[in-house]
Image (cartoon, grey):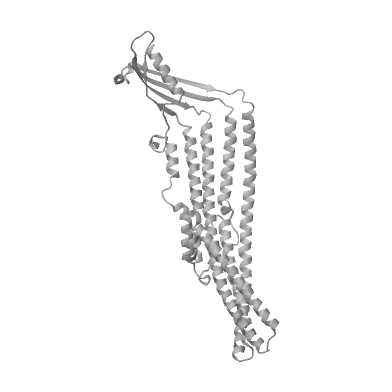
Amino acid sequence: MKKIISIALVVSILGVNSIPVFAVNEENANHAPRQFKSMVKKNKRTNDDYKFAYVNLDYWTKFNDEILSSYIQKAILNNYDLKMATLSTEEYYQQVKLQFANELPMVGVGFAPNYVKMPNVSSGDWMFAMPGLVNYEFDIFLKNHDKTKSAKKNYEASKYDERAAYISVAAAVGTTYLNVVQLDKVIELQEEIVADREVIYDLMLASNREGLASTADTVIANKALVNGQTELLELKKQREQLLHQLAVLIGESPENAASLERASLDDINYNRDIPESISTDIIVQRPDYMRAEAMVEKAGLDVRIAKKEFLPTINLSGLALFNTTSFGSLFSTRGMLYALGGAALLPLFTGGSKVATLRLRKNTYERILQNYYKTNLTAMQEINDSLVAVKLDKEKMERTLKQANLERADYKYNEMRYNQGTISKLDLIQYKENLLSIDKLVARQKVECMVDHIGLYKATGSKI
């Protein structure tokens, strides 16, 4: 009778989940199956080399700017969006481990001391019990295994998202930096234009006082000066905003934006030939394409899992119980009880939920498949758009350079005329402003061409 009461107490303790359950985790992974240990080892990252491989650092050296390369590296290590992307990938990895735990048996042990006093008995006895439970869902139809494979596809997709985030941030750093460098050059030229317009305005004032220039001409010169000063302020505002953006991209405070180094635009030159075409092998290596492919595979697994939900669930359970009135003889075989059993459960009526789940998974598969096709077309479009921009903007810049050379030759000719006294200083300054204006256009188009290359870099998934 006392043993029966002890067993009843132990079962009641198990019923309220007071016994600790220990699942295999990373600390005792040495005892896990070989498949799981290989998965842990395969996905363990010990350094940041893979992050630099994501962005293809060799590409950025083609700009011949060590400052730009250093900013790319800082962004890889310090950008907070990238840190969040990496942590998100780790979360998906842990979800894989959680799902894999369902393929393993669950083992629980406990200790249950209890004091027993029978009716009409003046004294009671202490009873000591140590139960052990084992429960395992016999995955004969590989449903849990498919769920683990589905979770792995989610993890795989998250890695492609992480890679896309690193490429996107690297492209943003390069584009922002080059636009800052462009503004440095344009502001320098605009300051010369403003200085020359101040000279023109002073000359017009002096001529007006002597009756050689009308008041209307003086007003026009003043308006040109004010417009030039306004444009200069706008350019400086744009540069400050881009510097703030660059600081955040590399993980620094915007308060340090003014101290960010940059090279001169004249020293930066992207030395790489424009490809005539892009191989389809590069297209299928884009992270968004590979992610779409992984999600199609996951959706297919989910359909298969939904079908297997119609099959019976088979569970194996085991119980071992050491029960004694003496703590010292707790592990003796005299007080040992054990049981082993199994059960198969086949749901007969679930209100149509399993059928609805299967149809939902099939519809989801079709939707994800269509997204895969769309991703393929979008990838080709982005690459073709980038190639067109690179080629045509280069031709446009070459024509602008010819125009700039002609303007420079014209200025030198007029400078000779000024030295010979055949034109006035006012005329020479106006010719100089024409030259400075075309130089501003050259600076903008030079950076535009380099940004086009960065667009192609991004469109090819950094594989250019």
Residue 89: image x %, image y %? 50, 45
User: Please, which residue is most extreme toward the top here?
Assistant: 120
Count of marks, rendered view: 0
Residue 34 appears anywhere in the view: yes
Residue 128: image x %, image y %? 35, 19
Residue 441 appears anywhere in the view: no
* Above/below status of 233 relative to 55: below
User: Please, which residue is most extreme toward the left here?
Assistant: 328
Q: Between 244 and 282, which is closer to the camera in this rendering?
A: 244
Quarter of the picture holding the N terminus: top left
Residue 419: image quadrant is: bottom right
Q: Between 102 and 464, which is closer to the camera in this rendering?
A: 102
* Above/below status of 418 relative to 358: below
Residue 137: image x %, image y %? 49, 27
**With 343 as the anchor, is 126 left or right in this view?**
left
Residue 454: image quadrant is: bottom right
Residue 412: image x %, image y %? 59, 84
**With 242 as the anchor, is 38 left or right in this view?**
left
Residue under the image location 42 percent in, 43 percent down: 41
Residue under the image location 50 percent in, 64 percent down: 62
Residue 222: image quadrant is: bottom right
Quarter of the picture holding the C terminus: bottom right
* Above/below status of 300 relative to 86: above
Residue under the image location 62 percent in, 50 percent down: 376
